[in-house]
Image (cartoon, rainbow, N blue to C red):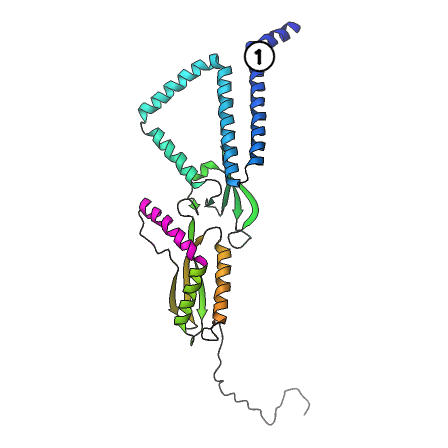
Amino acid sequence: MEDRLTEWLVDPTVGRLVFLAVGLLTIRLLLGGVQRSLARRIDDAGLRYRTRKGATLVAYLAAFLFAAVVFSERLGGFTVAFGVAGAGGGVRAPGSHRQRGRLAGRFLRRFLPSRRSHPARGIRGDVIDIGILGTTLMECGQWVNGDRYNGRIVRIANSFVFKEPVFNYSADFPFVWDEILVPVKYGSDYHEARQLLERVADEVVGEYARGAEAAWRDVVAKFLIEHARVAPTVTLSANENWIELTLRYVVDYKRRRATKDTLFTRILQEIDATDGRVGIAASTLNIEELAPLDVRVADEVRIRGSVP
């Protein structure tokens, strides 16, 4: 028994495994120290996240290289085999490396941290972490109205990006179009109502429109898409109940609900200031005339079975 233990201890493979474990533990401790130091020194959340991910990637590469050095003699054959396989793959598919690069780029463009995505199946939220096997999102919507976080963290496998459509709110155009409807009752000055909405829109979302113009030009140059109007617009339609004014505008995808609240508040304030020239319409039921009601009661009513 002692002889076997001695042989096991002096076995070079066991020694290399112990050396590898110590080295990997050291790399892990160094990584933890670097990440804690970065957390204390960097205030910006986005920069801190990217720096931590970069440090983690460097640690993985260091661990891989360390393991390769420790087992360099045993890995020599595998290195040759991998080289031959790679060369063969290159001969069979000269564009395969470009295809893999495109797939990786497609994934990264869609799921960079802090970007909002909607990878089908009713899941929508901001990407907060990307791992080797899965992506983590802070979910929006569901039982919460609007584009607010609901507090549920969703982890999904990275393979879904190649299987299902992904709706991205911020990859190439970090704005969305939104609309609000303002019903104005008949008899109001609808010209003043239109000017009122245009003035409020320019005040509240005009800055978004000016910033979105440059972003939309990049989209038009990149994709086969026509140029769309980014500036706020007001359109008018009429129905049997009221005159309907529709305000269409672009807004930051993360501030859609807050912006709509500000717009409605300012619109109501401006309507109140018109002294009745513009009025909000409401569904009403007008009864103008009642049909005549003729009720006749007989002089004598005999009920069968009753006492006379």
Residue 37 image position (x, y, % from top left): 57, 32
Above or below 100: residue 14? above
Tell me which secondary structure the magenta stretch mostly adopts: helix
Q: Quadrant of the C terminus?
A: bottom right
Examine the structure image and report whether residue 116 is included in the region drawn in magenta: no
Q: State the residue position of label 1.
A: 15
Residue under the image location 48 percent in, 68 percent down? 270
Examine the structure image and report whether residue 224 is included in the region drawn in magenta: yes
Residue under the image location 51 percent in, 56 percent down? 258
Above or below 258: residue 285? below
Residue sitting at the far top = 3
Residue 194 image position (x, y, % from top left): 40, 68
Residue 72 image position (x, y, % from top left): 47, 14
> Considering the numbered disc 1 on the image, is that residue within a helix, a strand or a loop?
helix
Q: Viewed as shown, does residue 33 lie left or right of 200?
A: right
Front-most of residues 274 and 177: 274
Q: Quadrant of the N terminus?
A: top right
Q: Quadrant of residue 42?
A: top right
Q: Quadrant of residue 161?
A: top left
- Mark 1 crowdedness (10 Å alpha carbons): few <14, some 14-19, many ≥20: some
* Residue numbers of the magenta segment: 204-228
Front-most of residues 270 and 122: 270
Above or below 302: residue 47? above
Residue sitting at the far bottom = 299
